[in-house]
Image (cartoon, rainbow, N blue to C red):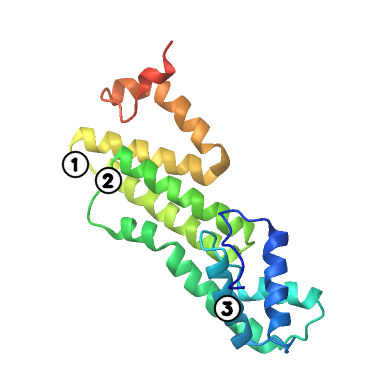
Amino acid sequence: MEGHNRHSKGAPAETKRAVIVASWEAAGKPAVDARLLKSIRSGLQREFENDEPDGPAAIARVLADAGAELKHPEIIEADAEWRQATIKAGAKDVATQLLSSEVMTLSSAEEFIAKLEELRQQRQRDEDRGALAEIIAIASESRRLAESIAKNRSAEQPLRLEQAEIAEWLKVWLQTPSLFADWLELRRRSDEFRTRFPVPNHEDTKTQS
């Protein structure tokens, strides 16, 4: 694969499949084991440097379609290890923010949810239910934390209002993640939001004619 040009983000699946099969053929068409899958994944990372490489099971399926013999126990074990590592790595940023001692602001909450949505879409494309469940768990815990602060009568009123708002954002994202961005835009234009948060976090003048 060294002679190939690196592909941009979002390369067609057909292109990736071709590279996977070509790598297997270049290796002499051996039986597919954990070692071969690791080698092919490393090659995919070099070839498609802006895309997350496919997991072991996905690569194995492509090779099976090409006629490769699969060593199933090794493939299952390799894929399980990869999924666990992916969950930890993919959720690292949002988990770090969740465990941080700093309370989220509206601005940081928007970035946080954007990252959650990015991860959700990636894992949904991969049909990775385990990782999706982890992402949902992080969002749910973040919502509970915001709600807890909002209900804390010893906290200052502006902070309670902000955390209540963030909890609502997370609730909407958990219920309808694909519609959250549009909902948030409408929410910011509402009189209630403008009254509660008179200093805008974004340039609202763009929406005014």
Check contact, mark 2 vs mark 1: CB within 8 A: yes
Q: Residues within 10 Å of mark 1 (few under 14, many from 20)?
A: few
Q: Is residue 61 visible?
A: no
Amino acid of disc 1: Ala
Residue at (58, 73) in percent of width and height? 2
Q: Residues within 10 Å of mark 2 (few under 14, many from 20)?
A: many
Q: Residues within 10 Å of mark 3 (few under 14, many from 20)?
A: some
Q: Position of residue 208 (x, y in %)?
A: 41, 14
Q: In the displayed structure, does residue 196 sit left or right of residue 23?
A: left
At mark 2, the secondary structure is helix
Q: Quadrant of residue 198?
A: top left
Measure the alpha-carbon separation of dots 1 and 3: 44 Å
Residue occupying the far front of the picture = 3
Vertical relation: 102 (above or below) 5? above
Residue occupying the far top of the picture = 209
Q: In the displayed structure, does residue 177 sit left or right of residue 65?
A: left
Amino acid of disc 3: Ala
Q: Earlier in the sequence, mark 2 or mark 3?
A: 3
Q: Which mark is residue 149?
A: 2
The residue identified by callout 3 is: 80
At mark 3, the secondary structure is helix
Q: Position of residue 96 (x, y in %)?
A: 32, 60
Image quarter of the N terminus: bottom right
Residue at (44, 45) in percent of width and height? 114
The residue identified by callout 1 is: 155
Q: Quadrant of residue 151?
A: top left
Vertical relation: 98 (above or below) 194? below
